[in-house]
Amino acid sequence: MKNSARMFKLIIFMLLLASCNTPLQESVPTTISTEIDKISLEKFKLVITGDNTEFSLSAKEITDMTPETMSVSCITSSGEIITGDITGVKLDILLQPYNIEQRNYNEIRLFAADGYSIIVPAEIVKSKDIYIIWEYNNEPLQELHYPIRAAIADERSMYWVYQLSGIELIKDEMSISEDDDMPAISTRKIVFMETAITLLESLDYTYNDSVDKAVSVDSLLTRFNLSVNSNGVTMHAMDNFDKAEKLDIFKKGYIKYTGEDSPIFIAPDMPKGMQVKHILWLKNGDTVYLNERMAYDKYKNVLTTSLNMKSVPIAEIEKLLNLLESKHYMLVASDGHIEKIDRETFLTAELFMDEAGLYVISYKGMEKLQTIKNVISIEISE
């Protein structure tokens, strides 16, 4: 299986340059894209791998299959709904000779020819058909999307990967829970992202002609994770967009924490469709990173008051991030100071920003309201 994975990555790396996930008929062809008459249907390959299975089909073999045509919609990144007729075949048609089905898998990763990839989460894989299409509105795909692309009815355009060159079938689930916007695996440690970032080396990052600040996500995980989990990372954005990412891809990226769209997961050569803007939280293993600024925005309608400052109840954060219930908790400040409190006290705690711009947790102590400044993490204590 390891050899198959290496072979798959090698094939994906060597395929033609294309683009990735813009909505149907929304892209304008450029000189970067390959002209239709220069793409050989016989040579363009779709590689499918996973669960001790690996095979490939040429675009010609796929487009020669008996198609079906149906009217479907996709949702653009701006929320616009685009409806049109697609012509193609279900992924299950390609899998049928190997006695496997799409719904046998928890997740499916789709690759574009330039290496763009995205994981289709379990709730979609189990309930909707993935199509491989070659016509839109009874016309061949425009040159930027040609010769084949993925299509999933009524889903975001980021899953409509064009110049589709690889499909990975995954049985181990990496994505978040189906029912909530919380991490599926229980959390043992919450790291407050903006405070944590102040302890890391930052770099200048140019984004849309602005020079902003960013930190390596590898340094973030290495410094603050209880342990780095190889199963991958999940990210949840303020618009409820969820994205699972493989650890090796994630660790090559950055969190840009100032300027437009921050905090945003980004990398210099990363297609825009793989970026995640306005991250509320991200999780690896049993450690979750919460962006304090985004948390304030999320809970702006239920903020309480602590020491004359608007604050977020820690009980809300506990619920949001699926923190394990414990008898005791450790509050750790950036200077190494640690406060250990019991659960009753923990439930009185609130997060707020003081006049100096420092994030503070207050809680009801024995005699008065206690505070701990520059809180970097909350950990359960056995």
Image: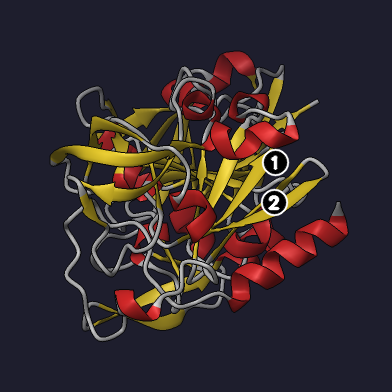
> What's the mark number on residue 56?
none
Q: Can residue 130 be seen here? A: yes
Q: Can residue 349 be seen here? A: no
The residue positioned 64% from the left and 28% from the top of the image is 101
Asked whether 332 or 228 is in front, the reply is 228
The residue positioned 49% from the left and 68% from the top of the image is 113
Residue 18, x across and y down, in percent = 40, 72
Q: Are marks 1 and 2 in contact (CB under 8 Å)?
A: yes
Asked whether 264 or 12 is in front, the reply is 12
> Label 1 to label 2, Cα distance in Å?
8 Å
Task: Give the residue furthest to the top.
Answer: 344
Residue 2, x across and y down, in percent = 86, 57
Q: Reading the chain from its start, which is encountered first: label 1 or label 2?
A: 2
In the image, is residue 264 above or below residue 211? above
Asked whether 211 or 3 is in front, the reply is 3
Q: Amino acid at mark 2?
A: Asn
In the image, is residue 177 above or below residue 210? above
Residue beneath label 1, please? 285
Residue 33, x across and y down, in percent = 32, 78
Q: Amino acid at mark 1?
A: Gly
Callout 1 crowding tier (Cα within 10 Å): few <14, some 14–19, many ≥20: many
Residue beneath label 2, please? 225
Secondary structure type for disc 1: loop
Residue 273, x across and y down, in percent = 36, 59
In the image, is residue 173 above or below residue 336? above
In the image, is residue 271 above or below residue 38? above
